[in-house]
Amino acid sequence: MRDYLLAALAGAVLPLAFAPFGQFWIAPLSFAVLLYLWRDGAPWRAAKIGFAYGGGAFGFGTYWTYIAVRIIGGAPLAVAGFLTIGLTAVCAAFIAVAGYVAARWFRARGAVAWLGVLPALFVLTEWMRGWMFSGFGWLSAGYSQTDSWLMGLAPIAGLHAMSYAVLLTAGAVVTLALGTNRERAAAVLVVLAVWGAGFAAYDRSFTQPKEHALTVALVQGAIAQDLKWKPDQLPGTLTLYGSLTQQSAGTDLVVWPEAAIPTLYEYVGDYLATMRSAMAKRGSTVLLGTLRLPPNASPDTESFQNILVALTDPMQIYVKRHLVPFGEYFPVPGFIRDWMRYMTLPTGDAVSGAADQPPLDAAGERVAITICYEDVFGAEQLHYLPEATLLVNVTNDAWFGNSIAPHQHLQIARVRAAEAGRYLLRAANTGVTAVIDPLGHVTAVVPQFETAVLKQTVRGYTGSTPYARVGNYAVLVLVLLVLAAGYVVKRRSA
């Protein structure tokens, strides 16, 4: 029991390594406790230790799910509890699988385990968590390192290379504490290698700025979530965003948040046409979030699409392609959907867009769009590159209230900018609205819950980072080779 409590405690402190706390050094120490507890364990014991660790980490690190579902979304307590605990359990299960596999088929003690097998298995299951069951890559180990030298690995091999470096560092800590002198020497070399590589690449640019600069304005309306979708609030919302946009007339590119217009595109056609014409006369292009009916939808449909519209001539539309389960669609059988209707809960499913939508042409740039948590899925954005010269993410993190989630989400966006080697413009309804440079540094930010316009000068970038060329394949091949070697070592020593 003591080991399970220690695992849960080590997991519970892990969120302190991420934004908004930013204590990146906690991550390798927290994971070191997990690797230590996995030594010499039976498979199911190792799985339970991994599950306890994941329960602590995701329980404290993603508690804001309850805020979104219950406090903001108004779902019944039982539904909110089920979804919050269920998400924690599913994420923890991936860590449990890593522990089970290590104890069942590999060596879980010694330098081979701490510097080889266990970090590799953890990163492999982290990568799987990022796409299985729709995917949930939140709290991936690498995100904790946006303010350390390991951020230098993002443009070279991406998020999972950063995660691998964190886990190798954790393994080195355990090896220094428990290993032989020869193993300790190997641990020192591993730490010097991964952190030295990060230091050597830190703030190194792999892409090239375009000659002409671009002025941008990111509009943060700061409309409370409990007011945003009330029909009587729509005229005021349109007036607010129109006024803030007129203040930005003459700026090359103006960006509104996700669903800034909280109604269907079909209902505001005249408003959009007037806005496009007025801003075009001043040399400005507006990108804004709204909703629309799916193509060929019946008049009584409950379905919709979450879109971003570029007020160009002709207008261009990006349709959100990676949807949030239980947020934008409900993967439930019919009888549960009937119960949801009885409880007056929303039951309409969003319809996703095509996976390979091209960048939009706006203000002389090729703009890669993501909506809300689509920016968690780095590999899904690689099809934009190297064609895209600018990244834009629009979101509505008002769902999470004044919690740690919006800050974690901004940290995720920082890694996406560094992986692509492009500026990322982030417009959020209530924050955190920010401009992120091609190295992943936040260059300007608007305080949360304030109505404001963030104006900056940026540049489009061309060229490709190594990660943009190779994606996650380099890390995955390395991880599989390490595991193959670890398996051979275990077989020969059996």
Image (cartoon, rainbow, N blue to C red):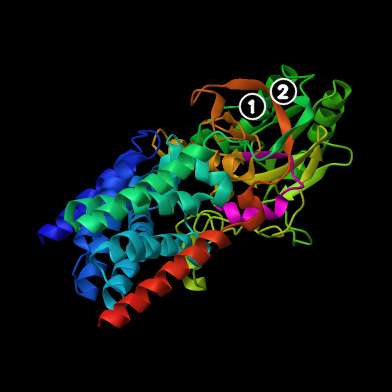
Q: Quadrant of residue 39?
A: bottom left
| Residue 131 in sight in this render | no
Q: Residue 381 in magenta?
A: yes
The quadrant of the rendering that contains the N terminus is bottom left
**Residue 222 in the image: x percent, y percent?**
55, 27
The residue labelled by disc 2 is 245
Q: Is residue 133 above or below residue 218?
A: below
429 sits to left or right of 390: left
- Residue at position x 77%, y 59% from top? 295
Q: Distance between the residues labelled 2 and 1?
A: 7 Å
**Residue 242 in the image: x percent, y percent?**
72, 24
- Residue at position x 27%, y 62% from top? 111
Q: Is residue 254 above or below residue 9?
A: above
In the displayed orientation, state which residue is furthest to the left.
2
Q: What residue type is labelled 2?
A: Thr
Q: Residue 472 in magenta?
A: no
Q: What residue type is labelled 1?
A: Val
**Residue 234 in the image: x percent, y percent?**
65, 33
Q: Which mark is residue 219?
A: 1
**Residue 84 in the image: x percent, y percent?**
36, 54
Discs 2, 1 touching: Cβ within 8 Å? yes
Specify start and end residues of the magenta stretch as a single range. 377-393
Q: Quadrant of residue 323?
A: bottom right
Depth check: give the residue in front, 14 or 398: 14
Q: Is mark 1 on a helix, strand or loop?
A: strand
The quadrant of the rendering that contains the C terminus is bottom left
Labels in figure, total: 2
